[in-house]
Amino acid sequence: MNKYALKAVSLLLVAVMGFSFTSCRKKKKTPTYGGTATVGITEAPDCLDPHKADSDAEREILINIFESLYKYNSNGELKPNLAADVIIAPDARSYTFTLKEDVRFHDGSTLDGADVAYSIKRAAGLLPGQDGTPLIAELDTVTGVTTDLLTVTVTLDAPDAELIALYTTAIIPEGSDDIETTMIGSGPFKFVSYVPGEEFTLAKNEDYRKTEVPYLDTLIFKFYPDIESAFIDLQNGTIDILPYITPEMAATLDPEVFRIQSKSSNTVQIFAFNNDAEPLNDIKVRQAISYAIDRDDIITQTMNDCGQSLTTGMSPILLGPYNPSVNGTYARDIITAEALMEQAGYANGFNLTIKVSSDDQFQIDTANLIVQQLQDIDIRARVVEVDPDTFNTEVLSEGDYETAILSLTSDFDPYDVIARYDSESSDNFINYSNALVDMRIQQIPLTADTNERNELYHEILVLMTNDACSCYIQDPHYICAINKRLAGFKVFPNHVLSMSSVHLA
């Protein structure tokens, strides 16, 4: 599965006057138990099978019902969940998980190694009756799963020291062929009812292993055709929480009634260079453009400063693999940019096209700002808007462009972020080629030690930065609005709505 997607990121997530974006240290008070919270979502789920679910709406809901061996926290750190720990074999061909004791499913049955083995085999397409096609594509290297009561060993057909999907696959009861109907998990909330296209209701799991949570008795997800209709219901009190609102909406909310919370969106906005197209095949030209771009101004103009400036193709939210040493490498420096242009033989500049998708105003606005900024080094750029299908074909598939602006996201898998820059990758739409980068990318799955893998990522990011393979602009944040009658809500950068910590204020 290609975990990158072209995202139409509207002008979200702005620090709005009158609101205090909370990340936040407040005086702790004892949470209140009981009550109901209603969350608005602008997309109804199509699939409720946790091994087949792929949309944001599906993940936002199912994270509260089903659990995995490890789980990302709100800081983007992968932490033990149903598993106590994991050991990766030195050859990176097997993973051995030790499970926590006394975990129960919603039906009261004990969760043990047999359930984990069944879940992984099912997700990998290895159960009797399956045709071998994995339900989760990343698990196509899994060849076997062995288990005893509290230990599970997964074997692979090739080394892969960073098989994130193995950590995050939902664990369901053994033999759950009808999981989309029964919805039995081990999470903090139990399935109650689903009215397709309208709402999804959950109830507190009274036997949850973390006895202090959840706080709420009832959790309701209401579905809306668009953000505008959901916002009306937020204002009139029909719903309590609405994620991913626009800054214009946030500006109209009463700060006495609503709290705004902001978080990295794990998105990389890229001013993509086709490294095969002249004059962008010249490193000095790419570096000159990178120095000419004022990222801070773009963030201010498009996001009201609610974004994080980037230098490389990975969001800082990927804590270990990200290399902060590259930060600021291409801080705006017109003198340096002009010198590089002259060295490349383009003292008088050149003409340049910037291709954008016509349905993505965020990218269009960014492109127009870049056109203005490039005038300072005599590059005469113009924006070319094409429909989304044409954009995907010409930019992502055929390489028929000079430069383009788009946003890339990943499912918190640093290898997928970086693997696209391998010169042989079909996802390498910028046509970047560096033999040492290729070598380091290929070493990552073979390296069992986390620190050593992170060193490889760090080196790759430095090499990419030095090559100025493209100009990376920002990780735009997103914002959520929460009625102040609730507290404890956390924004997760991997687009889930984990609600166990939410309680009445």
Image: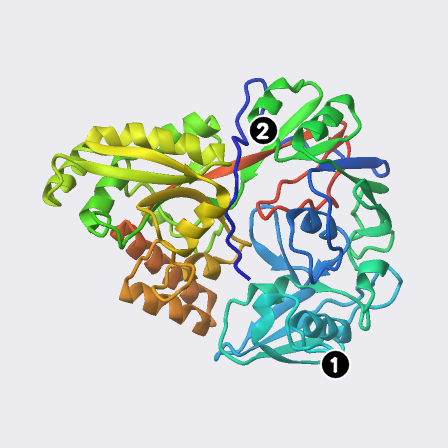
- Quadrant where the N terminus lies? bottom right
- Which sits in the foreground, 313 or 44? 44
- Which sits in the foreground, 225 or 135? 225
Task: Tell me if residue 54 comes above or below residue 177 in the rendering.
Answer: above
What residue is rendered at 69% in x and 57% in y?
Answer: 53
**CA–CA distance in space, label 2 to label 1:** 48 Å
Evaluate whether residue 275 shows in this view. yes
Residue type pointed to by label 1: Pro
Numbered disc 2: secondary structure: loop
- Choose top left, top right, bottom left or bottom right for residue 459: bottom left
Q: Which class describes the residues within 10 Å of circle 2: few (<14), some (14-19), or many (20+)?
A: many
In this figure, which residue is indicated by the disc labeled 2? 246
x then y, percent, for residue 295: 35, 34
- Which sits in the foreground, 81 or 14? 14
What residue is rendered at 62% in x and 40% in y?
Answer: 491
* Residue 128, disc: 1
